[in-house]
Image (cartoon, rainbow, N blue to C red):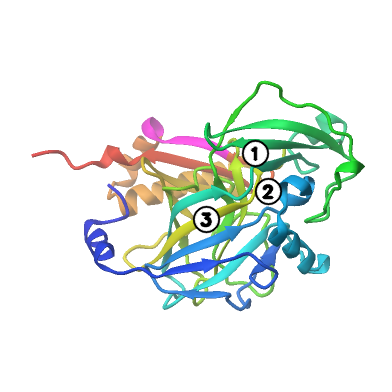
Amino acid sequence: MTLLHEDLVRERRAAPAALHILKASPETVHWGYFDAALAPVLRVRSGDLVQAEAITHHAGDAPELLMDGPITALYQGVPEADRHPGVHIMTGPIFVEDARPGDMLEVHYLAMTPRLRYGSNLAAHWGHLYEEFGAKERVTIYRLDRRALTAEAVFAYDYPEKYTTPGRIMEARSCCRQPALKGVRVPVRPHLGTAGVAPDERGRVSTIPPGRHGGNIDNWRIGAGARMYYPVAVTGALFSIGDPHISQGDGEISGTAIEASLDVVFQVFLRRDFTFPSPLLETPRYSITHGFDADLDGAMRAASLEMLRLLTEQYGLSRDDAYSLMSVAADFAVTQVVDGRQGVHARIRRDLFAAPEG
């Protein structure tokens, strides 16, 4: 069972889809915020495809490896004074025709391709174990093996101060490089750390904390093949993507993933046949709900209540049956502990609800 019903499948197969190309440039990104008053850079219809560039705000950690000409121009073209209150470079917003508050925006992520061969991980002052390392900040640069779909560290260096300026460019000569993680290879799983619709709030909303609009969820399962459902809060939805990663563990404990720019292909659909109050994820095998709060207990409770809602409203279970099933079949995990509002996600296998044969 899935939220993609058979009649919708038939309708989508019959409908032609337009393809839009959205490059990341100073004119098509907003750095560090969502804003319901922001003018859209692209207009699409339900069913359209978008090929968009998502640029990491960590490209300056090793500019000779993580930046090309257009990325350099983007960094030079967005003033530092306009990079607030968050840190992520967001491509968009995209206006979805006919989208209105109360709708659901379904985003089917089709492909996520690393733009360059390198990415950066930062152990930062917002990391979970910062004090354990004497309040030191450290950058580790990873190289992607596209054929093996792994990444390995090529060098690391201690950052000379607190990493507080979004998009700061660190010249190679100003740091001391050291070997790191010799012989260790990390599986690559490209995904978006931050994506979502504009919240119905006045002014800029930081990209750092996740929320009902999406934002900085940092769930590594939001990659190719996944479907995300975002509750629309403003006319046109105003959808944006950013914070691209090539790998991350649950928890994102040092403060960041392997941050690396991605080329992303996705398809957007407007849904009015169901509602859900928070970001909902479907992978090929699982349905996944999210909870966010100032502490993990609150995030756990929020994710649990959203899973309870999913099982009762979308799968038709009674509350008692749903509660029992959650205890014996749902898996809960810490999504991240470093984004201001901590995150927990709950997942359940969709094939539990397959219709019996005969």
Are circles 1 and 2 on residues that touch, CB within 8 Å? yes
Quadrant in the picture for the C terminus: top left
- Residue 326 position within the rendered picture, expressed as x and y whole percent measured from the top left: 39, 37
The amino acid marked with disc number 3 is Val
Secondary structure beneath disc 1? Answer: loop
The residue tagged 3 is: 264
The amino acid marked with disc number 1 is Glu
Q: Earlier in the sequence, mark 1 or mark 2?
A: 1
Disc number placed over residue 252 in the picture, else none: 1
**As displayed, is residue 298 above or below residue 270?**
above
Residue under the image location 74 percent in, 64 percent down: 73
For the residues labelled 1 and 2, the Cα–Cα distance comes to: 9 Å
Residue under the image location 59 percent in, 45 percent down: 343
Secondary structure beneath disc 3? Answer: strand
Are circles 3 and 1 on residues that touch, CB within 8 Å? no
Instruction: For residue 205, say whether it is visible.
Output: no
Q: Earlier in the sequence, mark 3 or mark 2?
A: 3
Q: Earlier in the sequence, mark 3 or mark 1?
A: 1
- Residue 181 position within the rendered picture, expressed as x and y whole percent measured from the top left: 71, 25
Please name which of the two marks, 1 or 2, marks the residue nearer to the observer.
Answer: 1
Secondary structure beneath disc 2? Answer: loop
Residue under the image location 28 percent in, 69 percent down: 15
**As displayed, is residue 152 above or below residue 7?**
above
* Outermost residue, left side: 358
Query: Magenta residues, as a range?
Result: 327-334
Q: Circle 3: is it few (<14), some (14-19), or many (20+) Cα within 10 Å?
A: many
The residue tagged 2 is: 339
Residue 91 or 354: which is nearer the viewer? 91
**Magenta-span inclusion, residue 314:** no
The amino acid marked with disc number 2 is Asp
Residue under the image location 66 percent in, 41 percent down: 258
Please name which of the two marks, 3 or 2, marks the residue nearer to the observer.
Answer: 3
